[in-house]
Amino acid sequence: MNQIITFGEVLMRISPLGNRKFVQSNSVEFYFGGTEVNVGISIANFGGNVKHISCISNDFIGDTAISYLNKFDLDTSAIVRSGRPLGVYFLEVGAVMRASSISYNRSHSSFSEIVPSMVNWEKSLENGKWFHWTGITPALNKGSKDTLLEGLKLARKQGMTVSADPTYRSGLWKYGEDAKEVLSELINYSTIFIGGINEINELLGTDFSYSNEDFIEASKQLIEKFPSIEKVFDKIRTSINSSWHKIRARMWNGKEFKETQDLDITHIVDRIGTGDAFAAGLIHGLQNFDDFKAMQFASAACAIKHTYLGDVNYANEKDVMTILDGNTTGRLNR
Amino acid sequence: MNQIITFGEVLMRISPLGNRKFVQSNSVEFYFGGTEVNVGISIANFGGNVKHISCISNDFIGDTAISYLNKFDLDTSAIVRSGRPLGVYFLEVGAVMRASSISYNRSHSSFSEIVPSMVNWEKSLENGKWFHWTGITPALNKGSKDTLLEGLKLARKQGMTVSADPTYRSGLWKYGEDAKEVLSELINYSTIFIGGINEINELLGTDFSYSNEDFIEASKQLIEKFPSIEKVFDKIRTSINSSWHKIRARMWNGKEFKETQDLDITHIVDRIGTGDAFAAGLIHGLQNFDDFKAMQFASAACAIKHTYLGDVNYANEKDVMTILDGNTTGRLNR
Amino acid sequence: MNQIITFGEVLMRISPLGNRKFVQSNSVEFYFGGTEVNVGISIANFGGNVKHISCISNDFIGDTAISYLNKFDLDTSAIVRSGRPLGVYFLEVGAVMRASSISYNRSHSSFSEIVPSMVNWEKSLENGKWFHWTGITPALNKGSKDTLLEGLKLARKQGMTVSADPTYRSGLWKYGEDAKEVLSELINYSTIFIGGINEINELLGTDFSYSNEDFIEASKQLIEKFPSIEKVFDKIRTSINSSWHKIRARMWNGKEFKETQDLDITHIVDRIGTGDAFAAGLIHGLQNFDDFKAMQFASAACAIKHTYLGDVNYANEKDVMTILDGNTTGRLNR
Amino acid sequence: MNQIITFGEVLMRISPLGNRKFVQSNSVEFYFGGTEVNVGISIANFGGNVKHISCISNDFIGDTAISYLNKFDLDTSAIVRSGRPLGVYFLEVGAVMRASSISYNRSHSSFSEIVPSMVNWEKSLENGKWFHWTGITPALNKGSKDTLLEGLKLARKQGMTVSADPTYRSGLWKYGEDAKEVLSELINYSTIFIGGINEINELLGTDFSYSNEDFIEASKQLIEKFPSIEKVFDKIRTSINSSWHKIRARMWNGKEFKETQDLDITHIVDRIGTGDAFAAGLIHGLQNFDDFKAMQFASAACAIKHTYLGDVNYANEKDVMTILDGNTTGRLNR
Amino acid sequence: MNQIITFGEVLMRISPLGNRKFVQSNSVEFYFGGTEVNVGISIANFGGNVKHISCISNDFIGDTAISYLNKFDLDTSAIVRSGRPLGVYFLEVGAVMRASSISYNRSHSSFSEIVPSMVNWEKSLENGKWFHWTGITPALNKGSKDTLLEGLKLARKQGMTVSADPTYRSGLWKYGEDAKEVLSELINYSTIFIGGINEINELLGTDFSYSNEDFIEASKQLIEKFPSIEKVFDKIRTSINSSWHKIRARMWNGKEFKETQDLDITHIVDRIGTGDAFAAGLIHGLQNFDDFKAMQFASAACAIKHTYLGDVNYANEKDVMTILDGNTTGRLNR
Amino acid sequence: MNQIITFGEVLMRISPLGNRKFVQSNSVEFYFGGTEVNVGISIANFGGNVKHISCISNDFIGDTAISYLNKFDLDTSAIVRSGRPLGVYFLEVGAVMRASSISYNRSHSSFSEIVPSMVNWEKSLENGKWFHWTGITPALNKGSKDTLLEGLKLARKQGMTVSADPTYRSGLWKYGEDAKEVLSELINYSTIFIGGINEINELLGTDFSYSNEDFIEASKQLIEKFPSIEKVFDKIRTSINSSWHKIRARMWNGKEFKETQDLDITHIVDRIGTGDAFAAGLIHGLQNFDDFKAMQFASAACAIKHTYLGDVNYANEKDVMTILDGNTTGRLNR
């Protein structure tokens, strides 16, 4: 009864080395990622027991993806296979004032054809303690939305904690349903809200500012409208440029507001998946620490993810704790 | 009035270095290819004036693909851009008794949404002398088939030579039309047939063997059924294993049968695109030499392609002529 | 009750790219291997349920090694960790008349300090059906020999099949016991003998030649001396040079002698681990086919391993079956 | 009548990966560059119609160079070929307080043997609107100086805009003519001056300081002495160290002085060619915007070039505009 | 009589590219290093005549190591070879708040079996002027400590200058002797002390703080207890994070205290061996400059080492002097 | 008095990985080579004491070249430095029927400006036993020819053995002297002739065929015309294609004719420098074995060089002896 469940698409990421563009060189590297599986892998690296549920292509690329998840010791037994190809995204990494760019090839991927009948939720959740979902899955198509909804309903019925990261990405949502409506329905089955002013304004139709005062008021209204939500966690990124960010977090847990200090990420290695590292840190933290320390753990996890290449956070619990304990000078470990 | 026209999908090929599998390493290389554009690039390398017509994604991957065609000085002015991603294929290169494997992600690619209204055939063919098509384009979907058919009709009306490489690949042809029927219609607008017993049997419903006698008889029946066809060229590959092939060719030009000797390719570097190199050699040869020498040129072009990594044949006319002149020992050029 | 158990050292292999020497370039690649774990991974790739038991360093190199085994979905739950470093070997790959060279750094590795108390054999073998060991493990030191012996005793007590690959490597065996004596004791707990004339002569003190007649007689005498042995399988390698080998196999199963035909490996990619691929093919084959087909499967598995870089055989059952079915020309899989 | 003409040497740049020295590794990368062709390629990337005129080696390295220019869709039809090798430069990239170092092999390159008779200026300039030259070309030898002079005379006769970047590099100028005299003659055929206090002091024999007041006065005196010059643009680089620069620009357009704000380049990827990116931005900007916005565009173009590896600026007009619009935080483009 | 002698272990360093972890990629690079040989190579790069004495494996890895030292023109004639493997260390390079990590495989290396009889000190020191040792060598085992002690005694007897870098690393010192006692004995044969408050407190059993006042007092007490010591040099590192350090130095030469200004290393390429670069700069500086300039040279050498990948400092004397002369902006050298 | 002297240009070789062309990828590798230094390095690898004399550029590329020679422990003390760049050659490696191609950039290299006054021959030859020269050096320009001639005269005066490899390469010899005349003069100072029918016909103006009978007669006439020559050695290469050669050798030592058997090089890694490996094997062999065994050693050295990437032969004496002893199957060395 201690399994964390993540459900979502696994994508193959392909990118040139360093800050090169595709047009400059034909040497590239690939990694696997996807917001939910990034969360799952990161929690597994913290020591959690994680099952990832997805639909993956039935070819050597799909085999490679599953082998990649196995590497991190994820439970892949509930993954189904499809004749369609794995989703792919291409990434060109920017620097300083040059933005990174992503191009997706995911609209007809193996995951996009998932439908509720392909997942046996009873069996999949039988050891489940926590269910994490994001706004990407319901944005892909009706099948993935319906499948997720079915899973969430069962998860709540079993009393599982449900964390929602309802990122709204307007480039998706092409299948004909209304994002706000769908997300609202899904949030009704969730207990932890990971998101900020943008997401709340989107859901409530409000126009709160980024101030702490507004954040508190917005959180209160969110909880009023979606009473299953108990706590709201918001990560704040200050971008100096593509290579230099600062990260802090704040929360309203229904009772009190707290905020962490900025962590200064002076030399970013890879920013993809840093939001997922925050969510993973939070999920791990809320199971082991009080709310404030969980949020500090999440911030530190998010910060250290910026130093790993690829979508996933390789830090283990000790690596993150070192930062929490104030050791941010990177002293050599022998 | 000397332009060679090729029309078809441009794919991105992604493969690990050497004989590695994807599961072994995350370092990969990409190239661009596609049977028709391979033919076009190869002819350009022989000195031909080539226009390639296609539909390519409107992102940095598409920009990279067009930049790749520009490198070879192809006329890319008739290429249209699409919001869909470029088709991709993944390749694992085998060795000895291990076969190479390909996995495609092309079914919803940018090219697959091409429809006749997207190509201005009048303008595109205004300097056209030769049109080359293959059986892949009509196999993809109705739009690409219709677009091709429209082009072929105009090409023939203008008296252009039309070469057909009606490869039948059963894994395609998902859009509901009958391969044999469609290919037959397209061959009626063609003058040069590049294909062997398998393709002829498929089209005629016959069961000829691979013997030279049967090839001659099959070619005669083919020409009888498709009277626009003037000449039939067949490339014969003898595979010792994945790393070692032999190549020869034979022809029936309506008057006489001729056959070349085997070229022994003892250490294959890359076999992808070698059939396209044969077609390109033939198209270039038939414009410059007699039929037999054209076929010899095509065989030598096919053979030397096995020594270049990637889909395209980097050999220029002199490189191929050297082999035709019997210099197959690879003496160092200083 | 269907688990295959392998027990032995996991080594990190480090080698330059292609045929380079260390002195030529500072770019190298690493893989993990070791004769027993190679067998285990190969069987897992054929679809078997495999548990590998070992002692691995308690640092990020050890973490990487375990992650590598997880990739292939091996059961790593019985692996113990040690403060000593993982064993390493350096490989320079030869070509033609240049031999490949290996230099080991394994004498004080994490595995070398294993002792019986570190393995809970009861628990480890509770689902065991087959136990595979090789002559490397008892050659390392007394602790690894004793641990193996304890495992073998229990395996036989539970009626498991035990396959022995008693390779004798004179560069090892430094800890003071007699190789012949130790190996003889271990073979008394084994039922399948994977080895040839050299190994039999070593064990029996005989001087049989490589002829089939001698092989039959030698096998009979072996079985007479070690009555637990039921079947003897011998792989024969004919080396034209470092880059070109031929492989065949022969067997005496107590009732009949059979021999396979040579498989011609004209372009070797990597010969390390090909003997392990044979053993794995045999273990998988004997559980699924008759003796002769099992040996054919093992020969084909051994042959195809020569086409994969690294120590392990990436072929799955279908890849090997293709060769068994006579398809050795490496036709492209689309 | 809208073609931008650039004329100058194309060099092959060879450098180790990252901050390595040649003595550390034998893996290197090559790019092509040269101050004038860098300007040409950058303008082509902004959407301009660019013809580059040069003399390039008649071997596979020269073929590769021309293929490289074709990639960016430059008009290469006026390039002539030579039996001499292409010029080469070797680059070791520094970091922090370690300077980057360049070693040239260009003194007997293919370009160095160009003479006026090798370029058909009438034909080459027939669609010309703008001609850009730099102080490198006349510094190489008499032939290249004379060829340039002939081109400039015709350009002015046709009323083309002529931009001069009269960089004075003392390591060149070995062929016996006086730099100041030659440059003065060439500037008499130019209308836009891209250079700062150093270049003006060199030409006028003055000793102005770097202050804005001196810059204005120096510009006035320059225009007085060279009345064809209409506008003076100066780029100012503040180097914190090899890895961290700031860039701003100022101008005197005969009527008013303007200055941009510093752009902070905290993590330089590659500083080679950033001055050329400024010139290209200016040439593109002056054709499309007012003088001040042109200079802002040039500064932003210069700044973003620091984020691309290689000599050329891969930014398109939109990439630069984004920075002009104040978006310097490098937000991820999906 | 001008040879600098260094004595110590040569290690092979293996690490992934950039900031990758071993678990992310199987492409790695190797370098050779070791604190004393790093000092020797750096001095050779400054133009010194250096002999390194060590014991190195008798295999192709050892051959590669010796070839590496030859590259820098070190005198390797006194190196002995051993049947044991070369020591190895694995490095994962961190960034920002992520620390770098090292895992050693050195406890049974070729160097660890050195004993006094393997080094002919008379012959080895016959042209010796300076002997440098560190606290690593006596920490490895009794043989290496005894061999060092014998060398130091002879060196002092011959009147050589002896510099001591008595780094105390608690992870070593496993062979049973007391670090403080052993180091004290060795320091009695030394004249230059390179170390800071930590080392002095360790040796004197004091608890001085890092203040300059305490440093002076500590140095005085050190010299009182170890009267052979003439001068004390201390390097001070301020770590902002793993990617950004500042370096300064201070000294007490028995007569006066001096301190340098911070050098700001905003983008670290590789921090391994920077302390050795300081020691080498000092040894070279004290032979050529006054004490303060020697310390400034050492600081600049230390700082610039942070910009070279690998363990050794590639800077020559002129590179360091450039920084001493205040040129820290990294202006391009053409 | 045991030093082997080699004198000639050191070139930097730059080539893409594997069989790639420059136009395919911007990743390349560099090596150093040059026919005479290749001979020198190979002899050093056999254990010889070798001094290489040359003129090398005074930049970081020249530093890297000297560091490369130091790696092999060559005596580089007589090398002079020049302001001109090091000679470069670009190599594209062919396969099967595709020839490899080389493009040179050497005509104004650092070595090409060598003149007799730059080499102190008295000092350079003071420990000399053997002097090796080739036809490349006198072909470059008058200065290098004169310098060589001066060295040869002194070498003969001191009674040194002089081996001549008078390769005639028509692409060189641009400085105005007659190749036949110059080579004849130089051969008069030589004692060992390494060359075949082509070279002899060139020198004698004869037209001998490749038959053994003609070889004997040609050798006799050569010795008659150049009485200092004592022995003639000829290497015969049979090229099946670029990837597969056979090598044998024959000799006339004034008394008897001998011939070796073909060595079959089925998978060539790199053929550059294989002739130099033959010469080096011969020079080493003639100092240690009888004439026939020396020639066998040379043939085996030539053959094994085909398996090493780069210009130089990494084989040591034992590696070559293994082949001489008939071990050509490449058995793994553990």
Image (spheres, coloured by chain):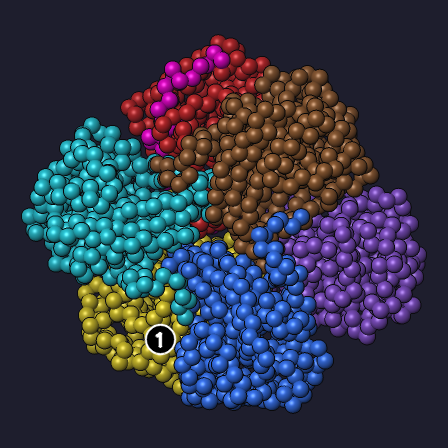
Chain colours: A red, B cyan, C brown, D yellow, E purple, F blue
Taking depth in this image into account, of D216 and E295 the one nearest to the observer is: E295
Residue nearest the viewer, comparing D167 with E113: E113
Q: Which residue of the protein is positioned furthest toward the top in this rendering?
A: A157
Binning the other alpha carbons within 10 Å of mark 1 as few (below 14), some (14 to 19) or many (20 upward) gives few
Vertically, is A25 above or below D107? above
> Which residue is labeled 1 in the image?
D83
Q: State which chain disc 1 sits on.
A: D
Residue F248 in view (yes/no): yes
Q: At which x and y percent is residue D48?
A: 27, 59
Q: Tell me if residue A105 is in the magenta stretch.
A: yes
Q: Residue at x 77, y 32 (%)?
A: C182
E299 over C29 or under it: above or below: below
The outermost residue toward the front is C213
Magenta-tinted stretch? A95-123
Name the quadrant containing residue E283: bottom right
Which residue appears at 58% of the width and 87% of the height? F228
Dot 1 amino acid type: Gly
x and y percentages locating residue E81 in the rendered image: 76, 57
Q: How many marks?
A: 1
Along the line of sight, which residue is nearer the eye, E325 or E284?
Answer: E284
**Quadrant into which the N terminus of chain F falls:** bottom right
Q: Residue furthest left?
A: B157
**Residue drawn at 64 percent across, 24 percent down:** C230
Helix, strand or loop status at disc 1: loop
> Which of these two is toward me, D140 or D152?
D140
Q: Position of residue C40 (x, y in %)?
A: 59, 30
As for residue D168 lying within the magenta part, the answer is no
